[in-house]
Image: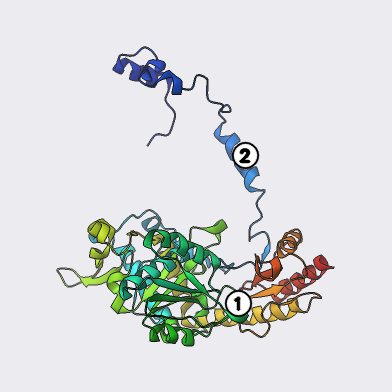
Amino acid sequence: MRFAPHTEQDVRAMLDALGLDSLDRLFDQIPASVRLDRPLDLPEGRSEMEVVDDLRRLAGRNRSADDLVCFAGGGAYDHYVPAVVWALAGRSEFATSYTPYQPELSQGVLGVLFEYQSMICELTGMEVSNASLYDGATAVAEAVNMARSATGRARVLASAALDARYVEALRTYGRGAGYEPEVFEAPGGRGGAPDVGEDVAAVIVQHPNRYGILEPARELFARARAGGARAIQVFDPLSLGILAPPGELGADICVAEGQVLGNHLSFGGPYLGVIAARMADVRRLPGRIVGETVDVDGRRGYVLTLQAREQHIRREKAVSNICTNQTLLAIAAAIYLAWLGPEGLRELGRRCAAKARYAAERLAAVPGVELLFPGAPFFKEFALRLPRPAAEVRDALIERGFLAGVPLDDADGRGLLVAVTERRTRAEIDAFAEALGEVLR
């Protein structure tokens, strides 16, 4: 395909074919009052070499997680991505493949997506998963759609410890669907007592939550189900090596941001949404589902299944307006989980938890710094209360080589969310604590 601009010969040939003597005549039908009577105010064209040099200089102004010691989290995390993940996921069979509607041509992609779905079900303790959604926020919104459809109810209750961006996404979706998410209090950064009336469709709890704290998920989900609502858990996939899975905790639907599964931070995306549910809700599950079957010779094969749920078939009667997925990122997630394995997942979880505990102790020992929720159990991130605005402290620490965390609105803007993954060393944590102390002096 050509992307070069038209030559003068091209333009002349077009005008000759149209019987016109100038480009101005081409626009005679447009009233002169709305036509621009001067050249566009654009700079002169640049050569490819010059443009590449300009872009390189522009990119050099960025400071990425590879340039800084990263303690930022809040939904996207600096976990190690093994080289094998993108060596395989980046193969042309995966990177260039499109919608696998023709299974006879797409067995490779369909087979890997089936493995991805199987791994997600094993990981979460749920019965069915789809082939991924766009991101974590999309998955939360689609889970709510499922719950409202299943229960025939309208109201949606969300914990105050749910990621605030997810709540905003629900407000956006809800304006069209006819609901407004209602936030129930989480005293001490966790728990709460949602009032699950007969009109409540869903109760949403994030575990670990937006502060990194572990929720009393069993009790909250039991309360939701006793009231006839669907219990929705937002989870961290890499926490499930050491925490009970959503299925065991009593969740009806579980969702996650899948960036942690072998995908780089990539300046904020693209990521993938994870969703899994009970088999009772399979026909309400949005997006693509890959199923296993056999061909005419009895050999195992894979196809997109239950497609009557989808928009390209049912139009306005579809369960969702999503009929695609993040295939490439889901493939990377499957490769990552296969590389990690059950024991690797447990070891990763233990390392994150132990390093986060050590970091919390070191940072809380800095004069003027304390845990925002002392005594609350957490997994790999925790919130601090600083003596100065968190955004100012974060910016000062960037100059010292640390991406310190995510400022929170809590504590009058002095809350800082700190994440500690398996990549962080004791030396880095100690240096971070020392740098924080210097900035706060």
Front residue (pair 382, 303): 382
Q: Secondary structure at mark 2?
A: helix
- Separation (CA) of disc 1 from disc 2: 40 Å
Colour style of the rendered protein structure: rainbow
Q: Which mark is residue 380?
A: 1
Label 1 amino acid?
Lys
**What residue appears at the point 59 percent right and 76 percent down from the top-left corner?**
212
Q: Residue furthest top?
A: 21
**What residue appears at the point 43 percent right and 22 percent down from the top-left corner?**
7
Give left or right: position of 175 versus 284: right
Q: Which residue is mark 2?
A: 53
Place of residue 71 in the rendered image (x, y in percent of width and height, measured from the top left): 66, 68
Q: Which corner quadrant of the image does residue 428 belong to? A: bottom right
Q: Which corner quadrant of the image does residue 417 belong to? A: bottom right
Which numbered disc flags the more N-terminal residue, 1 or 2? 2
Front residue (pair 224, 18): 224
> Measured along the vertical axis of the image, is residue 44 above or below residue 274?
above
Which quadrant of the figure contains the C terminus?
bottom right
**What residue appears at the point 49 percent right and 69 percent down from the top-left corner?**
261
| Circle 1 residues within 10 Å: few <14, some 14–19, many ≥20 | many
Front residue (pair 91, 215): 215
Place of residue 13 in the rendered image (x, y in percent of width and height, measured from the top left): 34, 18
